[in-house]
Image: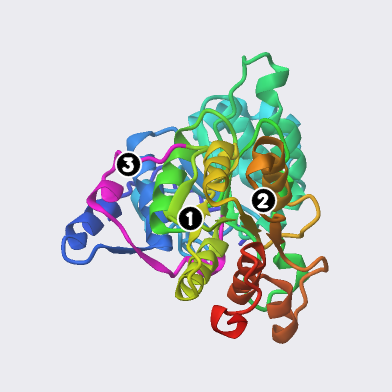
Amino acid sequence: MLGVIIRNNKTILLRPSFSSAFRQFSSSAKQMTVRDALNSALDEEMSADPKVFLMGEEVGEYQGAYKISKGLLEKYGPDRVLDTPITEVIFLTYIHTYTFSLISCLSFHLFISQCSLQAGFTGIGVGAAYYGLKPVVEFMTFNFSMQAIDHIINSAAKSNYMSAGQISVPIVFRGPNGAAAGVGAQHSHCYASWYGSCPGLKVLAPYSSEDARGLLKAAIRDPDPVVFLENELLYGESFPVSAEVLDSSFCLPIGKAKIEREGKDVTITAFSKMVGFALKAAEILAKEGISAEVINLRSIRPLDRSTINASVRKTNRLVTVEEGFPQHGVGAEICTSVIEESFGYLDAPVERIAGADVPMPYAANLERLAVPQVEDIVRAAKRACHRSVPMAAAA
């Protein structure tokens, strides 16, 4: 893990593009996992722009802890798919000392090995972005990003403003975020509201394969730092994808939500894995005569306030859903936006569904109680619609 392989002089044979192979296959089966969607997006962006490179723990030889970077080392070589030590932090003074070796990539691996005992890879990525490269930094889990948060917030997010626009920082920080299963409090945190509160960052949270492909491409192409919050439990989920989504030019706009299901009685907002829960809740509600509109936020910052408020003005009710803690959460910001812009349209108090206000328990039964479930969303929507009991029982 801590060893560095120097293979700059070795010829690496390129293999056919993963995405091209998948597009040929997709003619008969238009389904794609989130894992493959992320992999193909990385592949296509690295192929299109030689400035794009991937770095992180086990992204190369092991092909990623969750196999997101499968095949990329073989195709692009160790200069562009960089295995790093388990050290998320680095002092930027090292970056300026080794700038030219960083840009030329002639001694990039040696640079990493020299710094590995006292520093780490996030600052390397930020420094590379300062000088015009486009790093994609993978965290094995976003919980580890706390070790590097100074570089994400103070070095990446604020540099464009503090330099009066002279320094762009085109970098993507990506990896699994939020609760998984049985990994305890230190590996289950949702960082959407943490990073979403910081000016200078863009924060994206994909749900489907379409989201994953389109938003990751947008993040890599964006001139500003982007925090890309994936979900471990979604990697293996398959979603239908259209020919448009599979095209290499496909890209989704940052800051635009998607209405996953239209409705007229209540608006439900969610992001990442909770979108699936909201859609399941909407199906249950439909059987009881409640038409729920489900909004997939996609973008936490910037937040698509106009789509949210337009929906609330139509349905007159709002339920927000998120895995994170309730205090100062994404749902709280959405509620405030609706109160400020659409208060007169509300026919019921806003309902917030969030994770329990406790560190994530390890025990499976307690873990389930600590994160939102479909039935929680159903109950909240019924309360908003003044339907706490089924119509048959009320009659």
x, y percentage for residue 58? 55, 60
Q: Residues within 10 Å of mark 3 (few under 14, many from 20)?
A: some
Q: Give the residue number, with chain letter if any, for mark 1.
A: 264
For residue 23, side relative to residue 182 (left or right): left
Could you say which disc has been placed on residue 192 in the image? 2
Q: Which residues are magenta?
A: 230-253
Which one is in front in this view, the residue at disc 1 or the one at disc 2?
Answer: 1
Which mark is first along the chain, 2 or 1? 2
Which mark is first along the chain, 2 or 3? 2
Can residue 15 be seen in the rendering of this structure?
no
394 to 253, vertically: above or below: below
Tell me the element at label 3. Answer: loop
Which mark is first along the chain, 1 or 3? 3
228 to 65, vertically: above or below: above
Observer-nearest residue: 69 or 141?
A: 141
Observer-nearest residue: 392 or 167?
A: 392
Image point (43%, 55%), residue name: 262
Q: Give the residue at the far front of this rendering.
A: 395
Could you say which disc has been placed on residue 295 in the image? none
Image point (74%, 47%), residue name: 194
x, y percentage for residue 355? 72, 66
Spatial CA span between label 3 and label 1: 31 Å
Q: Give the residue number, with chain letter if any, for mark 3.
A: 250
